[in-house]
Amino acid sequence: MNETSTPANPGEALEAPTLARRCFESIKADVISGQLAQGTKIVESDLALKYGISRGPLREAIHRLEQIKLVVRIPHAGSRVVRLDSKMMEDIYIARESLEGMAARLAARLMSEAEISALLDLLEAHADGIDKTEGRAYFQSEGDIDFHYRIALASRNQWILENLHGELYQLIRMCRHQSGRSPARAQIALDQHRQIANAIARRDEELAEILMRRHISGAWETVRKILEDQND
Amino acid sequence: MNETSTPANPGEALEAPTLARRCFESIKADVISGQLAQGTKIVESDLALKYGISRGPLREAIHRLEQIKLVVRIPHAGSRVVRLDSKMMEDIYIARESLEGMAARLAARLMSEAEISALLDLLEAHADGIDKTEGRAYFQSEGDIDFHYRIALASRNQWILENLHGELYQLIRMCRHQSGRSPARAQIALDQHRQIANAIARRDEELAEILMRRHISGAWETVRKILEDQND
DNA sequence: GGCCCGTCAATTGTTGACAATTTATGAACG
DNA sequence: CGTTCATAAATTGTCAACAATTGACGGGCC
């Protein structure tokens, strides 16, 4: 009776019966971590050799990577790792703002009291983490994802959940991995998370949505500035 | 310099270089039109024989159908045409409400004057269509899609556009094809479209978003009632 | 010297056969 | 008679070879 299936992956792909899925997870990790740089050409034969499998499953893996927009494919020409430009990231953040805003609204309506108190506990843990690590990027980043994941889960909306964590968050993590992260924002983000959680606790749907949208559009602004400074 | 690429398919798949894509379009049409009923088991060998191709490209087609949620797949067990239940459709309509609301906001901000007047012309054409056909379902339905497609296009947001018309609208059309359609709603929908267009013309982002969200949540209410009446 | 066309290598698209897994069938047992 | 285990059929997952298409290289022509 466990409705909350696990987020997918603590570390490597543990549950991965089929070759194509293992391969998919592996390449996905390489793309997100930057080990396969943006724009890198992906040659099926080479990767098949590298992973010691045939081209069939590998093709399937690449097709799935294409669907979540981590690789771009041209029919007979081949496929390359996606090139994240400013416009694309803006589109992503705007879509995320829209969907997570709705998720926050639904969470305020549907979360159980137990879930809410668990959410508040999580935020306290994150606060401790920030104090101890002085805004160490890794913890903060994963903590951020934790929080947003719980909101999406609480929305009870499968489509929103899958798209946020199957597509959008992969791209955002990929972007973070190479644009760095301003540690000063850790405290700001935590405060905003607290406000959102409080709105949810008060069952104020409207406020929860508005705060979430501000939170995300604010995050985009900082990312945008980083990307701008990076391009000169 | 034609930014408005066509919505994909008048009738059959005209542009379809590769077997897998042709096959994908063909099966997709069959699923949406209901020729492959919900819950139908999809056997790779059978379909490959039916289309006169090998299992390879057909597998790819099925994988893509899985990604847009028209078929459900279980690793070693096989794949079936998705079964649209009330909960799933609610999730879809809520996600659509969120994304199209944002699209309307962006459209109000970004549409050119020429695009806006073209949009108003389109609505007049739809009005004539309704008068002439007395709410004939087909015209209305396609007209509805036309309108929403233009808004999504005007948002200049690739992610929103692709997800609305690559995933969500396919599922909604599939749902319509077998839940019928109350023709009385044609006039209501048109009026709401007019209000949205006017808000866009006035560059009132806030109002455009709110009206779009009301329009879609209203549409869901009527669909929900139809689904309820159908289940007894 | 620059542009165009034919040829060639490299890579993807497609195929049919083989292996692994699941579901269904049926017999033996409680 | 119902349940359970083993066997068998059907179906999916995987593989290696073949065909078709793309992009690049080089020679010829203007």
Image (cartoon, coloured by chain):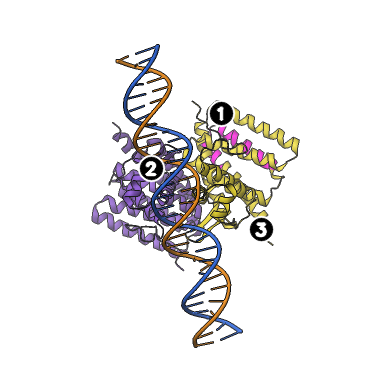
Chain colours: A yellow, B purple, C blue, D orange
Q: Nearer the viewer, residue A34 or A120?
A: A34
The residue wearing badge 3 is A228
> Label 2: how many residues lie within 10 Å, few (<14), some (14-19) or many (20+)?
some
Residues shaded magenta: A186-210
Figure disc tally: 3
At x 30%, y 33%, the residue is B231
Which of B196/B4 is in front? B4
Label 2 near label 3: C-beta < 8 Å? Answer: no
| Residue B135 visible in the snapshot | no
Question: Disc 3 residue type?
Answer: Glu
Q: Amino acid at mark 1?
A: Glu
- Is disc 3 on the same chain as disc 1? yes
What kind of residue is marked 2? Gly
Q: Residues within 10 Å of mark 1 (few under 14, many from 20)?
A: some
Distance from Cα at disc 3 to Cα at disc 2: 42 Å
Task: Please name the residue that numbered disc 1 is placed on.
Answer: A115
Query: In which quadrant of the rendered image does the C terminus of chain A lie?
Result: bottom right
- Look at 68% across and 40% down and name the residue there: A140
Examine the image and state in which quarter residue A229 appears.
Answer: bottom right
